[in-house]
Amino acid sequence: MSDNVLVRVEDLKVHFPIRAGLLNRTVGAVKAVDGVSFDIMKGETLGLVGESGCGKSTTGRAILRLYEPTSGQVVFRGVDLASQGVEGVRRTRRHMQMIFQDPYASLNPQMRVGEIIARPLRTHGLVKTAREERELVADIMQKVGLNVGFRDRFPHEFSGGQRQRIGIARALATSPDFIVCDEPISALDVSIQAQIVNLLEQLREELGLTYLFIAHDLSMVRYLSTRVGVMYLGKMMELSSSDELYDNPLHPYTKALLSAIPIPDPPLERRRQRTLLSGDPPSPANPPAGCRFSSRCPIAAEHCRSVEPEFREARTGHWVACHFA
Amino acid sequence: MIDALSPMSIADTVRRRHRGGAQEDIGGGADTEADVARRLLDVRDLETKFYTADGTVNALNGISYSVDRGECLAIVGESGSGKTVGVLSILRLIPSPPGRIVGGEILFNGIDLLKLDDRALRKLRGEAISVIFQDPMTSLNPVMRIGAQITENIHAHENLTRRQARAKAADLLGMVGIPTPAKRLDDYPHQFSGGMRQRVMIAIALSCSPQLIIADEPTTALDVTIQAQIVELVKRLQEELGTAVIWISHDLGVVARLADTVAVMYAGHIVEKAPVDDLYAHPAHPYTIGLLNSLPRLDARQKTRLQAIGGLPPNLLGPQKGCPFVPRCSFATQICRQENPPVTEIASRHSVACWHAQSLAGGRT
């Protein structure tokens, strides 16, 4: 494994059983993530995009082992996390943290801000005295732009953007190397989003962090990411450097996704040609045979419906799973 | 009065729209007769307050705007800016108490809706003006078949037999792009996906050929590919049927695609209003400028920091003094802190509420 790879995900699968009937028997499985492989390099931001239900959040959570992977490997700094015991996972988690989407639901309403940020420090035994803890918490609060005087306040006293800063502070408390950002700005107001994005960028530069940035806002992902992966129904469809993906998308799904994003420029919008996808994504419990995108693909041929395309490197660093790419 | 509220024929509306479109507005000044004829909705100095245990929330602080027949007006703003309260006030759908419309006029075809009695108002709702809400999950009745939910509105406003109403409902479903519509009439909402449910909502909204559709963030809960479908659908229907649309959104991208005119709201005020091209090319209010600068663009290799608007969204509790944007504005001066700026017209149909609008818009011809 090359020195530059911080996280290697190998054929990761996460299936959730569907139970039914009186005996609660397993009658099928939602294949939320169905065999994805990718590397995350040190210091980069890997963007993960796709529609709801494509498995992007599940992938992020399975990497941290917040979900138990059904099969596959997650190698973090050379250690396979998927096969580790509880203690091993706990030790590794100090170095990999998460920022959640909803700053309202992800903070305990009964805990003061100072306690929320101090909790990971205590869990991992990173502070010895109460004084040390106070100093560290104050330090982290300053770093994310929170007024240290607010440490004894409760989450409900803060706005959405401020709460997301608390969530970021909590993730930073253990000085991690790697942070999974699961739609960290989608619950925030437009004028606040840029503040949080700038903060994440600034922290990445200062602290040498590596991000997995999960989002459905493709404009923001392009802006933030070094490389971008596009997921559809539990599979990776395309993965390449950010500018290459947006300038030169190879997969018909990526093309459709990009053309669906409106650009805040009225004359340009009127000129733009759109590839409108018909219908909705199929259920991940019962994905189409062959290529998963074949049921909505504008260029699908007969063999697309029977043969699953291989995820291959079509150009240097540009991976795609399509027979026609 | 009832006569004035009845929907015009579609052809008539389309004709008026074309006539209107060909005419150029000449500067500001008084409304010409043609302006008045074209106008469908005219909101003047609308003020809505909520009287809560914590104090009075000034949700709307005297907003004025108008919608022409067949026009699409987008109202843009963040949560709490008053954009939803602004349009729900039109149909008097504000829960009262705690809410109350305390001032202003809402003229629809020249009739002040604030003076209508309940009966006349009920006739208007769903027939002349209809609403598409944000969340199709909660705005459809989960235990009622789709067909019944569409015909409910038809029966309330039109004298059709059950069979006729059902046939009309199937037509409407087909028009909004639901495959095999006649078969889907007996399905329940949970058998539809999010995008399909929003299509059903649009079908209900269209069922009595309204003159005005109010769409309150109809695509916010949807995925981007589905959002694109819904936006194209509404745009197509608006052009074919000549219906006027008020589209509420926080997404400046969607608005660029759809709107003819854009009004930007902040803290219960309309801070800027302009034709869509003019607003994006020559924004003049510091808030609009800030919003446009804080967005990364899909088509740009942008590696510089985003220009964020600092500070927090405003608190509408209690009385306001001065311009509401002052705490976040980098151009603020003494007068901004003391007096709320008047609305000034800086170009044809482009009005701004900012003391420094002229200098910020400077350089344009």
Image (cartoon, coloured by chain):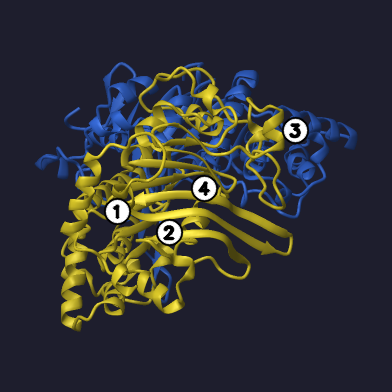
Chain colours: A blue, B yellow
Query: Which residue bears the numbered disc 4?
Result: A67
Give SS at disc 4: loop
Question: How far apart are the alpha carbons under marks 4 and 2?
Answer: 29 Å
Report whether A240 appears left or right of A197.
Answer: left
Identify whether A249 is placed above or below B164.
above
**Labels 4 and 3: the sequence-earlier one:** 4
The chain carrying label 3 is: A
Q: Quadrant of the C terminus of chain A?
A: top left
* Residue A204: % across, % down: 59, 23
Give SS at disc 1: helix
Q: Residues within 10 Å of mark 1 (few under 14, many from 20)?
A: some
Tag nearer the camera, 1 or 2? 1
Q: Nearer the viewer, residue A60 or A28?
A: A60
* Residue B64: % across, % down: 49, 49
* Residue B36: % across, % down: 33, 52
Tag nearer the camera, 4 or 2? 2
The chain carrying label 2 is: B
Circles 1 and 4, Cβ within 8 Å, touching? The answer is no
Query: Which residue bears the numbered disc 3?
Result: A141
Classify residue A79 by image quadrant: top right
Classify residue B53 by image quadrant: bottom right
Give SS at disc 3: helix
Report whether B283 appears left or right of B219.
Answer: right
